[in-house]
Structures are given as structure tokens and as C-alpha cells.
Amino acid sequence: MPLHPGFGGIHNAEKVIGAWGKDAEYAEMLQKFIEHHKLGGK
């Protein structure tokens, strides 16, 4: 399940309202890391 149910992942609610700063790259990498490990590292 996404960290923000209904929004699809980390900080996606903030993206929707445009409150998205320089942490975007790191948050996206973290989201990919989380998804990767939820799938058992596949």
C-alpha cells in the first residue's frame, strides 16, 4: 500500500498542490527503493 493512500506514494499529495522542492529526486529514489523491497527485491 502506498504511504499516502490514494495519492500513490511519498509526497505525491504535495506534488498535487505544487509544494515540491529540491527533495524531489531523493523522495523519488526512496519510493523506488521501497517498491523494490516490497516486491522482494525483484
Image: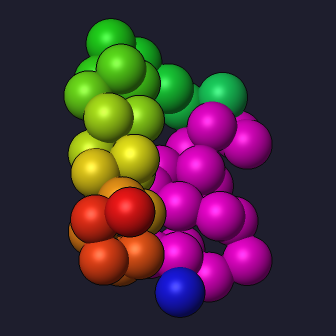
Q: Is residue 4 magenta?
A: yes
The answer to whether 28 appears left or right of 23 in the picture is: right
Q: Nearer the viewer, residue 33 or 40?
A: 40
Q: Residue 25: x, y in percent?
A: 36, 20
Q: Is residue 11 above or below residue 38?
A: above
Viewer can see residue 27: no
Bounds of the magenta span? 2-17
The answer to whether 8 appears left or right of 10 in the picture is: right
Q: Residue 14: x, y in percent?
A: 56, 45
Q: Nearer the viewer, residue 40 or 33?
A: 40
Q: Quadrant of residue 30?
A: top left
The answer to whether 38 appears left or right of 19 in the picture is: left
Viewer can see residue 42: yes
Q: Main secondary structure of the magenta part?
A: loop
User: Residue drawn 73% across and 42% down?
Assistant: 16
Q: Residue 5: x, y in percent?
A: 62, 82
Which quadrant is home to the C terminus?
Answer: bottom left
Q: Residue 21: x, y in percent?
A: 40, 18
User: Residue drawn 59% across and 50% down?
Assistant: 12
Q: Is residue 31 magenta?
A: no
